[in-house]
């Protein structure tokens, strides 16, 4: 059994496991670089609530954004009156969910054309970095002969 001073002197790395801080930092840097390069190739555009409806008589396109604000505004009103109102919290949260869903449904997201080599570099950096991060969180014990042995 180890004494308390020996336990205090042990260095713990990523996730409280012995060692692995260098592997974690390298994996984090690679994953960040891969994620940045990958998201740099993604183009996002929107039509500002394009799911609106058309008024046939005046040939005018209306959007539904104003209608999605009604539960949110009513919920905020309830919360101003009583901050502990369950109905106020439910309406406010439901209104926010409706607004966020409306925004996300109107987005057009696509991957900008790039070469296969660039795509492979991005994916190898991202997933290789994530693999190093997960590997650094796994506890490994060193045997006296220098080999590595998994815990039992």
Image (tube, rainbow, N blue to C red):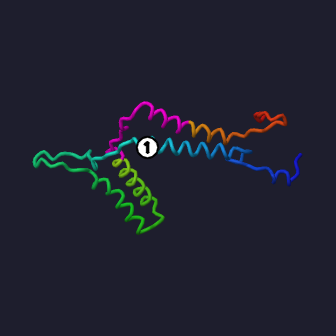
Q: What residue is at 65 percent from the left and 42 percent from the top?
A: 23
Tag 1 residue: 39
The x, y position of residue 8, in whole percent, is 81, 54
Residue 74, above or below 101: below
Instruction: Check the picture and name the quadrant holding the C terminus.
Output: top right
The x, y position of residue 114, in whole percent, is 38, 35
In the rendered image, the residue lying farthest to the left is 57
Q: What residue is at 84 percent from the left and 37 percent from the top?
A: 144
Residue neighbourhood size for the residue with mark 1, other residues' Cα within 10 Å, grouped as few (<14), some (14–19), many (≥20):
few
Q: Is residue 27 magenta?
A: no
Q: How many marks?
A: 1
Instruction: Check the picture and name the quadrant holding the N terminus.
Output: top right
Q: What residue is at 46 percent from the left and 66 percent from the top?
A: 83
Q: Secondary structure at mark 1?
A: helix
Residue 123, above or below 92: above
> Of residues 75 and 150, which is closer to you in this image?
150
Magenta range: 104-127
Q: Is residue 109 magenta?
A: yes
The x, y position of residue 148, in whole percent, is 77, 34
Q: What residue is at 31 percent from the left and 57 percent from the top?
A: 70
Q: Taking 31 as reference, is 152 left or right?
A: right
> Of residues 53 and 151, which is closer to you in this image?
151
The x, y position of residue 47, in whole percent, is 27, 47
In the rendered image, the residue lying farthest to the bottom is 81
Q: Where is residue 27, by image quadrant?
A: top right
């Amino acid at each position: 059994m180890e004494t308390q001073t020996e336990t205090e002197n042990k260095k713990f790395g990523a996730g409280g496991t012995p060692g692995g801080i260098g592997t974690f930092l390298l994996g984090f840097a690679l994953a960040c670089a891969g994620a940045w390069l990958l998201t740099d190739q993604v183009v996002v555009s929107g039509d500002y609530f394009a799911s609106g409806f058309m008024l046939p008589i005046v040939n005018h396109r209306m959007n539904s954004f104003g209608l999605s604000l009604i539960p949110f505004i009513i919920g905020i009103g309830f919360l101003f009156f009583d901050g502990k109102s369950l109905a106020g919290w439910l309406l406010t949260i439901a209104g926010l969910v409706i607004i966020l869903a409306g925004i996300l449904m109107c987005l057009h997201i696509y991957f900008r054309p790039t070469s296969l080599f660039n795509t492979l570099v991005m994916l190898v950096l991202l997933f290789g970095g994530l693999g190093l991060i997960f590997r650094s969180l796994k506890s490994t014990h060193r045997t006296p002969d220098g080999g590595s042995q998994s815990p039992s």
